[in-house]
Image: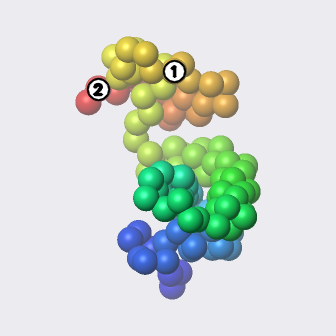
Amino acid sequence: MKKPYPSREKSRWEHALTRPLSRNVKFEVLELMRIDLFEYLDVLTTDPYDDNKDRAWLNSEIQRIADRLKELTQRRAKALGAALKARRVEYMWLDDPEAALRGDPQPGVMWQPAQKYWESVQGGEGRATS
């Protein structure tokens, strides 16, 4: 049995940085890893009380996070497609004017194929409502 991604373990930041990625890593796992990495980045860059941080260490940790996010980004499109096809992801707000808040950035080109795929999986029933 596969060991599940640790949702709130103490080592989750290091785990997100070092966990081996399988070819078919699930979209949900990628998203949990991304959340943990962004949380770690936030902690590293917003501590207002520590002026004595080792800047070389801090820079290397930020670079590790950036490198890992690049790895995860390369796998997201395939993982998202599989999640949509398996109906594990039920709704995407992209291109939905009722779901987007005023001032939200428009979806980028990268997400348009995922949005079209989501619409096709829904069987032409139109947009989902919340």
SS assignment at label 2: loop
Give residue 2's position: percent from left, percent from top.
53, 81
Q: Residue at x 67, y 24 (%)?
A: 109
| Residue 25 higher or lower than 82, as above or below | below
- The kind of residue tagged 1 is Pro
Q: Residue at x 49, y 77 (%)?
A: 11
Give residue 47's position: percent from left, percent from top.
46, 56
Give residue 40's position: percent from left, percent from top.
51, 60
The front one of 81 and 125 is: 81
Visible residue check, residue 92: yes
Q: Residue at x 72, y 64 (%)?
A: 56
Residue behind mark 1:
105
Q: Residue furthest left?
A: 130
| Residue 106 higher or lower than 37, as above or below | above
In the visual, does 109 lie left or right of 89? right
In the visual, does 56 lie left or right of 119? right
SS assignment at label 1: loop
Quarter holding the C terminus is top left
- Depth check, mark 2 against mark 1: the one in front is 1
Give residue 1's position: percent from left, percent from top.
51, 85
How are the colours assigned in the image? Answer: rainbow
Residue behind mark 2:
129
Which callout, 2 or 1, points at the residue further toward the start of the chain?
A: 1
- The kind of residue tagged 2 is Thr
| Residue 13 higher or lower than 44, as above or below | below
The front one of 43 and 126 is: 43
Visible residue check, residue 32: no
Query: For residue 20, which numbered disc appears in the image?
Result: none
